[in-house]
Amino acid sequence: EWGRFDVVLAADCLFFRDFHEALLQLLPRLLRPPHGSVLLLQPRRGDSLELFLHKMTQRGELQLVAMDLDYCPEISEQRQKLSGMEGYNEDIHLPVLLHLQLQKK
């Protein structure tokens, strides 16, 4: 049965751009109308995150409610410590918290 969940949690699932469309087809069908939400924790990974959000906007089934980098004090503290260190790259190591919701009709 579709539309059963108030909240869907997902992490690090936008790396492969070839799967964006499948994910954008699946997520709205998992959510319970009218206010089902997705919490997605995802590094930017080049333009992968922005490309996903662009495709999402074009489809019109989900909307971006919030995008947050400072969602957890411990993560923010580690970000400060690691910033500038060799091997640390926020683009691939820092997860962004996205809150997506079913588009209001």
Image (spheres, grey):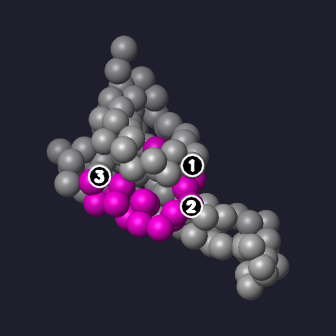
Marks 1/2: CA distance? 7 Å
- Which residue is at the front of the view, 26 or 8? 26
Q: Residue at x 17, y 45 (%)?
A: 105
**In this rendering, is residue 43 above or below 23?**
below
- Mark 3: amino acid: Met
Marks 2/3: CA distance? 17 Å
Residue 50 is one of the magenta-drawn residues: yes
- Mark 2: amino acid: Pro
Which residue is the site of mark 1? 12
Label 1 vs 3, first from the N-terminus: 1
- Which residue is at the front of the view, 16 or 30? 16
Tag 1–tag 2 contact (CB < 8 Å): yes
How crowded pointer 3 is (Cα within 10 Å; few <14, some 14-19, many 20+) is rated as many
Query: Can you tell which of label 1 and label 3 is closer to the viewer?
Result: 1
Which residue is the site of mark 2? 43
How crowded pointer 1 is (Cα within 10 Å; few <14, some 14-19, many 20+) is rated as some
Which residue is the site of mark 3? 56
SS for callout 2: loop
